[in-house]
Image: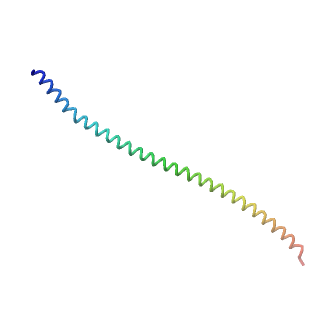
Amino acid sequence: MEDTIKAFNDILGSVTAIAPMIEATYREVDNTMKAKEVVLDRAQSISAVAEETSASAEEIAAAAEELSASTQEIAVNAQQVLEVARRLQEQTGRFKV
């Protein structure tokens, strides 16, 4: 009987000693879960910024293409104006007195 009581006391002592370890483990797991959430939130923020940057880059590329097309159109128009000016100069040269 005494051995049984001693065994139960030993078991109770072991359980009592393990309880703080279980609590510490729970706290560490909880902290790890909170840290995981922070990392996940930051990763989602980075992903959103990357998507916005990509969209902005596409808009800039489209704007650059439009600017290039407009520049080419202006160059063509300038060439046409220059040709008209040459013809006018030739025609006005005929009327010199």
Towards the viewer: 60 or 90: 60
Could you tell me which residue is drawn at 83 percent across and 70 percent down? 88
Q: Residue furthest left?
A: 2
* Image position, residue 87 (x, y; %): 84, 68
Q: Residue furthest bottom?
A: 97
Could you tell me which residue is drawn at 72 percent across and 62 percent down? 74
Could you tell me which residue is drawn at 89 percent across and 73 percent down? 94
Could you tell me which residue is drawn at 45 percent across and 46 percent down? 44
Q: Left or right: where does residue 73 sit relative to residue 96? A: left
Numbered circles on residues, count: 0
The quadrant of the picture occupied by the N terminus is: top left
Q: Is residue 21 above or below residue 8?
A: below
The quadrant of the picture occupied by the C terminus is: bottom right
* Image position, residue 68 (x, y; %): 68, 56
Q: Left or right: where does residue 26 sit relative to residue 2? A: right
Q: Left or right: where does residue 91 sit relative to residue 80? A: right
Figure quadrant of residue 28: top left
Q: Left or right: where does residue 14 sit relative to residue 82? A: left
Q: Is residue 17 above or below residue 37?
A: above
* Image position, residue 82 (x, y; %): 79, 65
Figure quadrant of residue 24: top left
* Image position, residue 56 (x, y; %): 56, 53
Q: How is the image coloured?
A: rainbow
